[in-house]
Amino acid sequence: MDFAELVRGFPELTTTGLVQGAIYALIALGYTLVYGVLRLINFAHSEVFMIGTFGAIWTWAVFGLDSNSGAPSVPKALLLIALAIVAAALLSGSVALLIEVTAYRPLRRRNAPPLAFLITAIGASYALMELMGTLTQRRQVGAPALLPTKTVISIGGWSITPVQLLTLVVAVLMMVGLDWFVNKTRFGKGIRAVAQDANTAALMGVNKSRVIALVFVLGGLMAGVAAVFSDMKSGNTRYNIGFLLGLKAFSAAVLGGIGNLRGAAIGGLLLGLVENYGSALFGSQWRDLIAFVVLIVLLMFRPTGLLGESLGRARA
Amino acid sequence: MTALRERWHSASSAVGRRVDGLPKSARITGLLAFIAFLYVLPNKWFYEYLNIPGVWIPLYTTRNDMAAVLFYCAWIALLSLGLNVVVGYAGLLDLGFFGFFAVGAYTVALLTSPESKLITEYNWFESPWPWLVTVPIAISLALLSGVLLGAPTLRLRGDYLAIVTLGFAEMIRIIAKNQDWILNGDRGIPQVGHPPGKYPDGSAIFQFEFKPYYWLLLTVIIGAVFLIRNLANSRVGRAWIAIREDEDAAELMGVPTFRFKLWAFAIGAAVGGLSGSLWAGQANFVNSSTFSLENSILVLAAVLLGGAGSIGGALLGGFLVIYIPEWLRSVGDVFGLPEVATVFGNDIDVSPTSLRYFIFGILLIIVMIFRPQGLWPNRRRAAELKDRQKEVAVVE
């Protein structure tokens, strides 16, 4: 128990925790969207994220940047990041759509039991992870350092680097955008209707298949954005990176109340913070343990997460 | 595709009907012959002649010792037999099954290894215990941990239970990995005891060779199948199925659902602990890396691939999830498949050895599309699912 460390590092721990939490939250949104509509733990979502991390690095490689190249000028770097976000989001979104169309849709057609979906998700996860492992020779791939590491804003003991600032701003924008999309648009109304009662929604003229495909794509887009920031934060990626991050993100989704978009966002940020504070307090080797302890303790007292399950109900 | 599916269905059920139609004596003889076949299987003079007729593709694994592969197959089969009670019968989604396996393996390791800190540092006892004595302790501790985990968590339903069990298994793994008091962290515990038994010439049967362990596991599995089959056909088994089908209805009809769920959990955990103690005896070394979540998921895949709720299915699934990837390793040699491909100037290892889990993942997806109820489903469950398929979903 190192309280001195916690107090001394508090501002920095808060920033890094929020940044990590924002990445968890973006991935968690994908889990929660699919769960809210299909009641399915989409195990393959972690691999959708993993492919996004490679998508970003490949995009940068096209422009001749790898882990050894120097930092480009700031406007150029921002442009490159924007390009990588678009590329990774598109790649992740299409992989998510591919999984839905080739693996889940045939099962839904046949009204297969829920466990069949689960094992299909496991199968898809194996296939994607091993395919990428083979393609990348199971090596760690480095990302270029695009933004300078010096502090941009510093108030008192609290400071933030450009990567952290960008991660938080973009993540918040994505979350607000998704929330608006689901709550205010026609498509969002369709999603909420299918989440509430798929068959009734279909009878009312909602195209169920299209809504489900849309949900997978949205989740994939969020994972793609998270992937770019994960690359920039850790500076590298690997074919098996999705596993632990996906697990944490899923925990975050459950923490907030799975099926609930705002819950996933809050759960993600909270998990990032708690993990950081906890690892300062008990030592960093316990970081992963803290996440699960918090989750289990919370589920004892609030069995449906912080905000409860509610994609289908009015307050999504 | 639909026609193909129909044909596959009618063919597989025709085999089932034909087997059912045989007299009981014939069925028992067939079963005994099959068990005898399993016992002879790890012998080289026997399996060398196993080929797909006509094309001469070996059915045994050429890259790995067949006895070792069979041992791992039997190991996962025993685990999926235990998980089948939890997932297949009681319908509780348990993603942390390897936690109980870890409890069993560590118990045996701590009590039988001369390097165990219980002896070297804490002086709880003088010399390591014999392996056989520690197995019941391992099983009871695993059972106890199942009850301890189940008591507070089994009130959670469905996917929340899944995440809590997953968290529990990860917690056990991280604690085992990080702390140094007794479990030795990543360095693990070496020199775990072996099961007793000597050949007539005085040398020990159970050393590092896989074959005797495979036979031991096979025997244990046969025993466990009898126990679980009787349990499943008793009041307990009927209560489990009632809970799986509709928990609220079962509770209203007077089934004490919580108690029976706890039973399912505890029995599954005990089988997991048993498997852990057998595995520790063979591996001779226990550390946290075996208890990864990937393995829990592999066992779950085994249960569902075989067909949840059916003992034969669980065993078949457990066999296949190890055997298919291992067998794929040898396929490349037979067909002379390329080992390396060059893409964008990079040499990529495309040998079946490298791609085997990719192929396995694709196979899982394909099997689920054609047989969502699993390869060898429980008959009652298969009928329920068939019924379900008729309730066509509204407008796709």
Image (spheres, coloured by chain):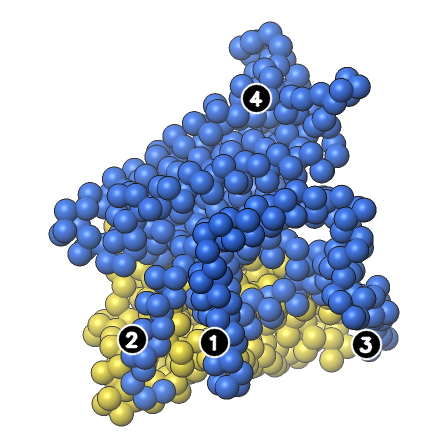
Chain colours: A yellow, B blue
Residues at marks 4 and 2 touching, judged by CB atoms closer than 8 Å? no
Observer able to see residue B350: no
Q: Separation of disc 4 and disc 3 at Cα?
A: 54 Å
Q: Position of residue B344 (x, y in %)?
A: 82, 78
Identify residue type, mark 3: Val
B126 or A152: nearer the eye?
Answer: B126
Chain under callout 1: B
Is B239 placed left or right of B46 in the picture? left
* Disc assigned to residue B132: 4
Q: Separation of disc 4 and disc 2 at Cα?
A: 54 Å
Q: Are marks 4 and 3 on the same chain?
A: yes
A61 or B221: nearer the eye?
Answer: B221
Chain under callout 4: B
Image point (64%, 74%), residue name: A55
Task: Name the front one of labels 4 and 1.
Answer: 1
Q: Which residue is disc 2 drawn over?
A: A195
Label 4, secondary structure: give it: helix
* Disc assigned to residue B10: 1
In the picture shown, does residue B189 fall above or below B117? Answer: below
Image quadrant where one finds the C terminus of chain B: bottom left
Q: Separation of disc 1 and disc 2 at Cα?
A: 36 Å
Q: Which residue is disc 3 drawn over?
A: B343
Task: Name the front one of labels 1 and 2.
Answer: 1
- Crowdedness of circle 4 by 10 Å Cα count: few (<14), some, many (20+)? some
Label 2, secondary structure: give it: helix
Q: Position of residue B213 (x, y in %)?
A: 66, 35
Residues at marks 4 and 1 touching, judged by CB atoms closer than 8 Å? no
Identify residue type, mark 4: Leu
Q: Separation of disc 1 and disc 3 at Cα?
A: 44 Å
